[in-house]
Image (spheres, helix red, strand yellow):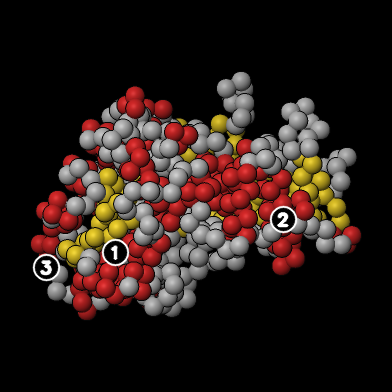
Amino acid sequence: MVLTPEQELIGKQNFSGAVEAVAGADMTRREAIKAAAAGGIGLGAAYFGYKELEADPVRVAFIGTGDEGNILLNEHPPKYMNVVAIADLRPSNRERAFRGDGNEVRMGLIKKLGADKASKIEVFNSHKELLDNAKRLGIEAVVIATPLVTHAPIAIDCLESGLHVLTEKLMARTVQSCKEMIRTAKKNNLLLAVGHQRHYSVLYHNANSLVQSGLVGDVKYIRAQWHRNNSFPNSDSWQKGIPSADKGLKDADLKAFKFDSLNHLINWRLYNSTGGGLMAELGSHQMDAASIFLGKVHPLAVSGYGGKNFYGIPGVGPKDKWDDDREIDDHIYVTFEFPGTHFEQNDRDKAIVTYSSINTNKFEPYGELVYGSRGTLFMKTEKEAMLWKEEGRGSQGGGPDQRLWVISGTTTGGGPVLEAYETTSGPKAASGGGPDWASNVSRGYTEEMEHFCYAIRNHGSDYWPGGQPRPPKEGGLRCNGVVAMADAIMALTANIAMDQHKYIEFKPEWFDFESDATPEADFGVDV
């Protein structure tokens, strides 16, 4: 979606004003919005309604300190988490955990905590070594940010050792593994969280409040995309070289973790046996967002196309791409069908979500466009949100060039409605001057780790009432294993649909962690 700077500014002001208006008398949300406008971060306790941690910080170990692990280390909340150990197979990653990348995104533990405190953090070569020392170190929980294929075995080992687990997304390489993780957490009465951080994004929560209030009307279509251009030489961030510090790793160390070579370990995202491709690494974020906007309902069906259309084709693109041996698709296009609001009364009421991820053009930014019958919501790169009124017969204007404000509803439902006016009438502020607070809000990493620790301290001994994870309204995790498994089912089933060129209908038993049914078993996928 290509917009002028003025249209984007109008959209952001529309969004912030609408959020303030819909928040209304909810003082908790209003105060959190004010804090966000002032550039506040780590708003989870104030915004999502749990108290700040009053007990000692949870003693946590980080397993996996590469790209994502370093972001989590960077964003971890010291008031909630006491990092006592790290573990990583690669020497370069262990060093990187402390030194960082020389920027504010991955600053490293020395800069984050200070040299003295960082020096007390113990270092291990594997999660097995870490678990052998867990009791001595008093470790209570782990954060896992390792290659996808290792999420389940490492998480299960940690859960069996009595440790709470927060693992990065995608939850696991197979749905069967997801179910084993949940069952192990339940058996041991432990928390299992998964890092789909949009569940803890103040920006996305406020956007969803507008959708659920009915402000944008009936949502029939969501377009999500994550486009990149890797057609230029040396432009692919997923294809990495081998650091000299890692060249001493032995084959036995690699094979113990199902990696055939050092290249396989370092570039695990590019191979089917260790990664889940564009759908798992990128699309899972956006399907998670789409399902949030649709009320967290499970999808009905999926179809799509995926292909290796660019890498490894002589004559296509620069020569440095011709001998690329990656296995994953470099272009994917999928279509999901979700039940609409009135699907139970009429099964023709559906909402469609399309997702595309390509590697040869980044003209449009990644994000999600929510098309409602009364308004359009644009979530841009996880950091900005924009809102515009839909122009209709008898309504007062609309579209990306018009500012809007929220008034009391005159519809049958009595909900809020949007009114718009021409921008030429002057810079009238929406809802009393709604601030452009969206650009200052945390992306949710800090908040998810805060709440993980809060839940351990307050619900750790009673997290499975009635055999199900404690619900968020009772202080439970916003993205527990059951919620995250649904995201994994969407991504992994989409991969099957593309690989087998099939239109696949989702089965309810796939989403039941007590059932052994999985899409892999039903479609003969070798796991």
Q: Residues within 10 Å of mark 3 (few under 14, many from 20)?
A: few
> Quick check: marks 1 and 3 in contact, CB under 8 Å?
no
Residue at (27% x, 69% y) in the render: 117
Give, as a three-letter code, the residue at label 1.
Thr
Q: Relative to the observer, which residue lies in front, 421 or 505? A: 421
Q: Relative to the observer, which residue lies in front, 110 or 358? A: 110
Please, is residue 229 above or below residue 77 in the view? below
Residue at image mark 2? 434
Secondary structure beneath dot 3 equals loop
Residue at (24% x, 60% y) in the render: 84
Query: In the rendering, which numbered label is found on residue 411?
Result: none
What's the distance in space between the residues labelled 2 and 3, CA to CA?
58 Å
- What is the x, y in percent for residue 405? 78, 49
Q: Relative to the observer, which residue lies in front, 341 or 86? A: 86
Give, as a three-letter code, the residue at label 3.
Lys
Residue at image mark 3? 250
Quick one: quadrant of the C terminus? top left
Q: Residues within 10 Å of mark 1 (few under 14, many from 20)?
A: many
User: Residue 389 vs residue 162: left or right?
Assistant: right
Residue at image mark 1? 65
Residue at (32% x, 53% y) in the render: 57
Please, is residue 322 above or below residue 526 in the view? below
Secondary structure beneath dot 2 equals loop
Counting residues from the start of the chain, the first of labels 1 and 3 encountered is 1
